[in-house]
Image: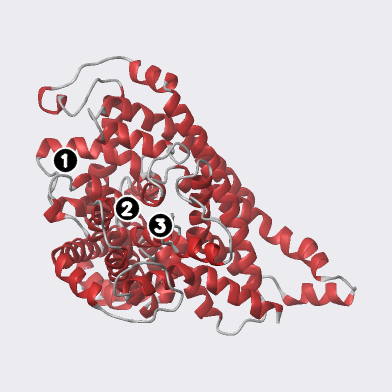
Amino acid sequence: MRGAPELRGSPGRPAWLGGALVAPALLVSGLIIAYPFVRTLTLSVSDATVRTLGSGSHFVGFDNFGEAASSWVFMRSLAVTALFAGSSALLSVAAGLAVALLLAGPVRARGFWRAVCLIPYAAPVAATAFAWRWLLDYNYGAVNTLLVRAGLGRVAWLTEPGLDLAVCVGFQVWRYFPFAMLLILARLRSIGPELYEAAAVDGAGKWDSFRGITWPQVAPLCALLFLLRLLWTFNKFDDVFLLAGATRWTQVATIELYNEAFLGTQRFGLAAAMAIIVLVAFLLIALVVKGIKVWAGVQD
Amino acid sequence: MVRVVLLAGLLACIAFPFYCMLVTSIRPKVAAFELVPRDVTLSAYGSVLEDLRSHIRNSFAVATTTVALTIAFGAAAAYAIARFRFPGKRAAARFFVLVYAFPAVLLVIPLFVLWARVGWVGKLPPLVLAYLAQTLPVAIYLFTNYFESQDESVEEAALLDGCSPLGVIWHITIPTSLPAVAAVGIFTFVVAWNEFLFAYSLLRGNSGADTLPVKLYQILQSAHFPWGELMAASIILILPVLVLMIAGQRYFEQGVVSGGK
């Protein structure tokens, strides 16, 4: 577009200087994002492994995608991912809403409570995942010790099929509820008290005013937060990897494709094809998020 | 009353893992878990600090370099987006959103291939580049919002008085943007300090370069590691983050709300 306003600089702020100021950030991001993106595409149609790094790889068409689609382990990992991400997102938003409702009431030192809630989220995942491992250790862990003392048996929290996945979901809820809580709390505090006062005058109970006043105000935000959590949990790697490793039930898609790329013969081609399949799923969720953002009236 | 009980329950849920971590780290020799430790010793910290010194230094070097470059590049780019007009500006702004959204685990494979080709695998400085891709978009978002909320008239006046555009940035914009610098700095430090995946993948084959989280994972992988020392190391890993959070809670929350993943 000729003469579009964004093309013209002004005397004190020449366009070239603007360009120069963005350049370093653009360059770094381009190198780290744009190049790998293109490289993922070219890797996914090649037979690249760790051995072909020096010699060069060959074009193999869509063989890698065919292999990924017929790989039972990869398909299972996608199912595990859906279960893991879906339940983690749902429960962390629910927990965030519950804590936000608790903190929106007459609570002293609200800032202190917000800080306390943020600790699981801010603390390094390596440290918290290992603390959970220790907590749930079969022989010496705190939880089993207390269970035995209470006359109950030990539980194999991190090795029992299915239970290990539930523990991972619990870890996600513990770590990520603050994210939902902060945003929901801010929204709750913006609801005028006169609405609740009027409802109380009309004889509405707590549940009535939650359903009639609070929920309609926060429901779109909760939907948005659910999808955002789904989006970020869907491609989480370190949380599950550090807490449970890759058992049958906890081998999420990201761990499976990571293993293809970094274990054994390091099949970068196959791993890249899996990465693209995960990315497509990611983009589909991202599209829905965009739609929900419009509905929820939230700006980017 | 119900509220007090619920708050106590919340505190217990959040604090229990940290409490166990602390108790275990000050026990002489871990045999069984004790809710209230009887004998207390700091010997685990002594040996862990000795073993981990170089890894703590690695982590600090990477995190502080990432913070410095994120603030410099991020503020510059955001300033251009907020104040300048130039071709491709909107496309650049949109590209940064895209960069933010791209899943890290999908980057690590092609990056490893690239790193292997140019001989960067196992080297610490290039790791900063990988971190910048995670931190720059959030920094640009925070800085742009901040610059756009600031009154432009002082800068305009300085420009009319013959101050150069860069002089305006240095003398006016930066001194008035310290809150944004704090928010970006704290958030970036925490992200870089905590990061595991890139460090674990791109530092392969050179255990001397391991950052602290990677070193902790290596300890966990060894056959008969002492829980007491691992928990002491975890406490050391958490401490800087905790200090920053307490010192700059408001700024940290800004980072979480706009850049939390």
Helix, strand, or loop for circle 2?
A: helix
Q: Amino acid at mark 1?
A: Trp
Q: Residue at x 26, y 71 (%)?
A: B159
Q: Which residue is labeled 1 in the image? A: B115
Q: Residue at x 53, y 61 (%)?
A: A177
Side of B136 relative to A113 (left or right): left
Inter-mark Cα distance, 3 to 2: 28 Å
The foreground one among B33 and A215 is: B33
Q: Which residue is labeled 3 in the image? A: A133
Viewer-side label of 3, 2: 3
Inter-mark Cα distance, 1 to 2: 17 Å
Side of B41 relative to A287 (left or right): left
Helix, strand, or loop for circle 1?
A: helix
Q: Which mark is residue B11?
A: none
Q: Where residue A295 sits in the image (x, y, percent)?
A: 64, 49
Q: Amino acid at mark 3?
A: Arg
Q: Which residue is labeled 2 in the image? A: B134
Quadrant in the picture for residue A213: bottom right
Q: Amino acid at mark 2?
A: Gln
Q: Residues within 10 Å of mark 1 (few under 14, many from 20)?
A: some
Q: Residues within 10 Å of mark 2 (few under 14, many from 20)?
A: many
Q: Assign the N terminus of chain A to one quadrant of the image.
A: top left
